[in-house]
Amino acid sequence: MNKHFLNLKEYGSTEVRDLVYAAQELKKGSLLDKLKGKYLALIFEKSSTRTRLSFEVAMSQLGGRASFLSVNDLQLGRGEPIADSAKVISSMADGIVLRTLKHETLEDFAKSSSVPVINGLTDLSHPCQLLADMVTFIEQKGSIENKKVCWVGDYNNVCYSYIEAAEIFNFNLVIVCPEEFQPKDLKLASNVEMTKSLDIGLKESDLVTTDVWISMGDEKETSSRLAAFSGYQISPEVMDKAKSDAIFLHCLPAARGQEISHDMLDDPRSKVWDQAENRLHAQKSLLLSLL
Ligand code: CP
Ligand code: NVA
């Protein structure tokens, strides 16, 4: 059966751990020509810097090619059915990265694709981001097993993938989120907890991470979100409540003055530039495995 990368758990725990370890090896160097002659299509319904570029550069460094296709330039954007588009595109490309507004669009596309489909972010999840986050934590601090991770802010697509990663990598995850934005019927594993208390979340944390309060697609809720999340900004002073050797990650792009203070990314505990670069190494690992 055709293997896709739609969510971490669907892909498989052992397989995800292997991707992260392989990414660390790939980072050490040696340009491979393993994907010579392969072509990757990047189809995006939303903006992107890191995801787009990391896949394009990864393909180039592995000897293949990639091109970025905005949905608006494809017949898909004019209403050509998803299944028809998937059949045609997958008859020519060797892999397809999709960034969609709705996760169902990704799933529908994958069902009709004859080549691997990669989730480049949906409203539900962002599994590629977590590969880079795991690479970054492990290279900075060693194993993440039994460590405490504190997610602060919106319960969003990146947070969903953190929950899956907590199970796969066996770390303890505390999600700090105002009550009105906590998802109701979510069943959490014993190593994941949700609280509105920043102090509870930060205490003894090894990793503190956050993301924008207004994700792409949430713009209409800007004023209510800014009000609800206003007490949840991460700054160097807030980081002082975590372990003294804790690190800070943010998938980027960041909104300085909202979820982070203006000086947070310059703090030595912030490893966001390593994290962003690691998107490239993680993407290579994923492409070598799938293509
Ligand atoms: N973190 C991330 O996915 O960034 P882009 O939206 O720039 O791809
Ligand atoms: N949660 C953010 C992540 C961007 C990489 C969004 O969906 O806009």
Image (cartoon, rainbow, N blue to C red):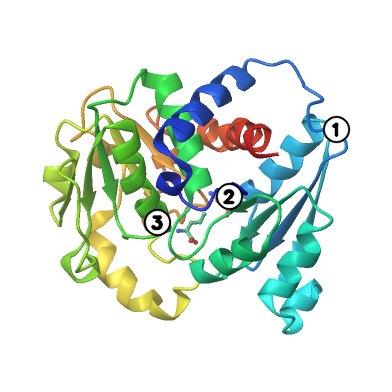
**Residue 219 placement (x, y as % from top left):** 46, 75
Q: With 8 as the anchor, is 117 left or right in this view? A: right
Q: Nearer the viewer, mark 3 or mark 1?
A: 1
Amino acid carrying label 3: it is Gly
- Residue 142 against residue 58 in the figure, above or below: above
* Mark number, residue 4: 2
From where the camera sits, is residue 102 visible? Answer: no
Taking depth in this image into account, of 206 and 8 the one nearest to the observer is 8
* Mark number, residue 36: 1
Q: Secondary structure at mark 2?
A: loop
Q: With 142 as the anchor, is 38 left or right in this view? A: right
Q: Earlier in the sequence, mark 2 or mark 3?
A: 2
**Residue 13 placement (x, y as % from top left):** 40, 36
Q: CA distance from mark 2 to mark 3?
A: 38 Å
- Few, some or many C-alpha atoms within 10 Å of disc 3 (few <14, some 14-19, many ≥20)? some
Residue at image point 66% right, 49% down: 116
- Residue 276 against residue 221 in the figure, above or below: above
Q: Earlier in the sequence, mark 2 or mark 1?
A: 2
Taking depth in this image into account, of 94 and 223 the one nearest to the observer is 94
Determine which residue is flagged by label 3: 257
Residue at image point 24% right, 68% down: 181
Q: CA distance from mark 3 to mark 1?
A: 44 Å
**Residue 113 placement (x, y as % from top left):** 68, 60
Amino acid carrying label 2: it is His
- Residue 103 against residue 198 in the figure, above or below: below
